[in-house]
Amino acid sequence: MNILEADYIYIDGEYITHKAIAFDDKIKTIDTKEKLLELYPNASVHHTPPNSIIYPGFINTHVHLEFSSNQTTLSYGSFVPWLGSVMANTSKTSSCSSNAMQEACKEMLTSGITTFGAVSSHGIDLEVCTQTPQRVVYFNEIIGSNDNMVEANYDSFEQRIKMSQKYTSDIFIPAVAVHSAYSTHKILVEKAISYAKENQLLLSAHLLESHSEREWLTTASGEFCEFYKKFLGVEKPANTLDEFIKAFDDTATHFVHCVQATKEELDMLAAKGHSIAHCPRSNRMLGCGRLSIENIKAPLSIATDGLSSNWSLNIIGELRAALMMHYDIPLHELSMQLINNITSIPAKIFGLNCGMIAPGKLADLCVITLPDKPSSLKEIALWTILHTHKATKVYIGGKQYV
């Protein structure tokens, strides 16, 4: 048994004081340290520096580990030129080293991320994801819009997902990702959704990331028109926007980006039981625009995306970017919302028994230390986002890794 004490604990949207947490692999009791020691006299007591907060472990729902070594290869500022640079450098972007992916996992861990959703296009990150200490939801991605490659692309997907299912455990959860409406043949979309439903697997998909994507899907024109002719010899979209979204109607899906979705489309996603991942820095780097999170009724997570469209996988830095991007939302209200967007909300999206500090929840915890004593409890979420960079301690299943 362990007892972890700190000046503040984040519980149910509030910062409580003068309490501690008793835990093994799960949280047992929350009370004063003195009362916990009466209950568990042989417990190991873990102290924290002054002005520390115990948070639930942070959750990053969307990251591409396989693209962790392309920081000076790709073109930024606009989505289609960036995608063209990805295609033009395929040999480099699809051959990321294990060391680079391990370092990416470590960067996430030190910023307090105890669970992440890894989107795998090629399966080269499988070994790293089965060995990292974090919980991993491993999204095997299906992609390919060429009519003649449907069977081959599905066979590749099926081989990869069946390989990942061999590693299924409490901390490694295979899942399914459909790349996007513009890149995935409608037959592959249907087959991937069916596989997810039949095997009760989580499902994710990129959706309406850029203006060019929306233009291509709705009018078969714009930048994507020239792009597809150049790289794939294709002259019409793989799906229409409406038919792609409708394909997921009866399967709750974690849609990523949705920057160019209308309010009506965002409302429809919520009504169908879907959720959304917001990647602020990636959207800015690729010139996609700002997701109107004030219009979103669906459960929302904040995610880093991959190092192909971000300079860091630090989740606190991602919150800082979101805080600056969404300037119309009151500062303290947004700060509290953002903390929930990386804790309790993504835990519910992924169906995990974590993301909250409560008896019976998994002991996935991170300690964040402020540089000074906060002037009031209502400021702590804001100070956490503005003035911290790394976790002081990180626990996953009760074991300390930082």
Image: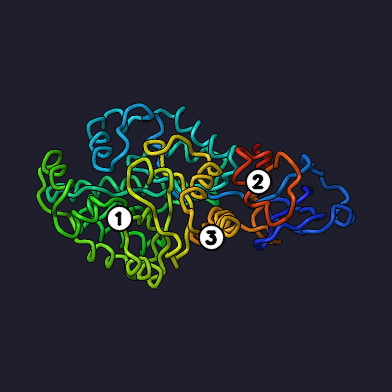
Q: Is residue 183 above or below residue 328?
A: above
Determine whether the residue tagged by mark 2 lies in a helix, strand or loop: strand
| Gap in angstroms between the C-alphas marked 1 and 2 | 33 Å
Query: Closest to the observer: 26 or 69?
Result: 69
Query: Closest to the observer: 208 or 143?
Result: 208
Q: Residue at x 30, y 28 (%)?
A: 92
First in sequence: mark 3 or mark 1?
A: 1
Q: Is residue 197 above or below residue 83?
A: below
Dots 1 and 2: beta carbons under 8 Å?
no
| Gap in angstroms between the C-alphas marked 3 and 1 | 22 Å
First in sequence: mark 1 or mark 2?
A: 1
Side of 241 relative to 139 (left or right): left
Dots 3 and 1: beta carbons under 8 Å?
no
For label 3, the residue is 345
> Three-letter amino acid code at disc 1?
Leu
Q: Nearer the viewer, mark 1 or mark 2?
A: 1
Q: Is residue 353 visible?
A: no
Question: How many other residues sit within 10 Å of disc 3, few (<14), some (14-19) or many (≥20)?
Answer: many
Question: How many other residues sit within 10 Å of disc 2, few (<14), some (14-19) or many (≥20)?
Answer: many
Q: Residue at x 35, y 55 (%)?
A: 259
For label 1, the residue is 208
Place of residue 231 in the rendered image (x, y in percent of width and height, measured from the top left): 15, 39
For label 2, the residue is 366
Q: Please name the colour scheme applied to the rendered image.
A: rainbow
Place of residue 218 in the rendered image (x, y in percent of width and height, measured from the top left): 18, 60
Determine whether the residue tagged by mark 3 lies in a helix, strand or loop: helix
> Three-letter amino acid code at disc 3?
Ile
> Three-letter amino acid code at disc 2?
Cys
Q: Residue at x 64, y 46 (%)?
A: 384
Place of residue 39 in the rendered image (x, y in percent of width and height, measured from the top left): 86, 57
